[in-house]
Amino acid sequence: MDNGTVYDVAIIGGGLAGLSAAIVLSRKGYKVLVLEKDVYPRHKVCGEYISMESKPFLEGLGLPIGAMALPVINKLQVTDTRGNEVSATLPQGGFGISRYVLDDALARLAQQAGATLLTKTKVDNVQQANGGYAVTVGTHSYTAKLVCGTWGKRSNIDVKWQRPFITGKNKALNNYIGIKYHITYPWPADVIGLHNFANGYCGISQIEDGKYCLCYLTTAANLKNCGNDIKRLEREVLMKNKVLEQIFTNAVFDEGFPVTISQISFDKKELVHDGVLLLGDAAGMITPLCGNGMSMAFHSAKIAAGLVDDLLQGRISREQMEQGYTAKWEKMFSARITFGRLIQSKFGKERTTSFFLKAVNALPFLRTQLIKGTSGVPF
């Protein structure tokens, strides 16, 4: 058992959603416990591009975006599997920052706000107990009035709970892999590139210190067909796109990479489980090509923190909190995620991708609608 402290909120997962929710709630005077299985700073598979819609929220958390000399990205370049190109201006734009820097900065802000942050702490189970929750870590148990699940794309708790996306058979939306590098390469600082290859796509955009994030998504089957050899996959599949061939041939790759993740699912997920609010990727993932996953994590944290505050202050019931979170999440993100799945279905297949990009090139209003459909408003 722990020291007997009863936390107002336990947050399982110290990523973007978890840390930002912890900052907001701690500043309101609540006892917040964050349980994170890894350490800070660390690299994570992520496109590392944040839409400007998140900037007001991040600055409100205390992250000095304007003083961090981060690259501003306001152009998009997309190529099909043959390297044919479509370009567009991003109306809101965004900025690049690595998870190595961002998560560490948010963790420090959470601790400064008064949150208890435990790293190298993997949660084994969450159960309702005595009107609250018991959060089990090995032989220890932490007590909290409320719990938020912010553990990212997939965790042991998802498996323990047998969540539908774990047990489902929707292979069209499940079992993707993500692979990320940090590189040095002469790519335009204001452009985010999305380059298609057979059954996947690869993004490149600048982060801090002149480095670039190079991150790609593909199916597990694609890797398996290359003998589960990442280098062979890149050589035989990705580099058939002439733009990716140039990047992978001429870039200088940082040590310590690649970072990988497997069993990624874009299937629909429940938003509340046994009274636990699920935030960020634990609640649902927008396809990476839309570039809004990080902003959605922050926005879901803001929504959840507001409702948790309302419940703890007695302004709403637990049922109203759960229903309010579900309704607000669906209103903000459901259409974006559905639209993202639709766009992803057009990518990674040679003929389909080429036809799709030609249509976008010929119909500028379609290009505008596609960008608008996966974007949100400042919050």
Image (cartoon, helix red, strand yellow):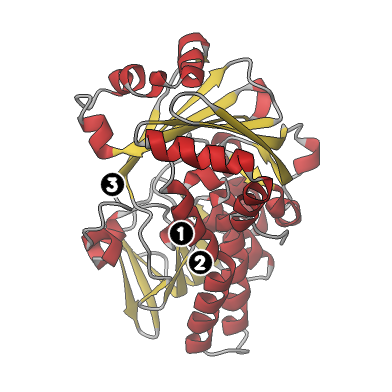
Residues at marks 3 and 1, CA–CA distance in whole angstroms: 20 Å
Determine which of the numbered discs, if any, sits on residue 334 in the image. 2
Residues at marks 2 and 3, CA–CA distance in whole angstroms: 21 Å
Assign a secondary structure to mark 1.
loop
Q: Residue furthest front?
A: 362
Q: Mark 1 highlights which residue?
A: 150
Determine which of the numbered discs, if any, sits on residue 175 in the image. 3
Q: Amino acid at mark 3?
A: Asn
Q: Residues within 10 Å of mark 1 (few under 14, many from 20)?
A: many
Q: Amino acid at mark 1?
A: Thr
Badge nearest the viewer, 3 or 1: 3
Q: What residue sits 45% from the left and 15% below the top?
A: 245
User: Which sits in the foreground, 66 or 356?
Assistant: 356
**Comes first in the chain, label 3 or label 1:** 1
Q: What residue sits 43% from the left and 70% below the top?
A: 271
- Residue 379: image x %, image y %? 71, 62
Determine which of the numbered discs, if any, sits on residue 204 in the image. none
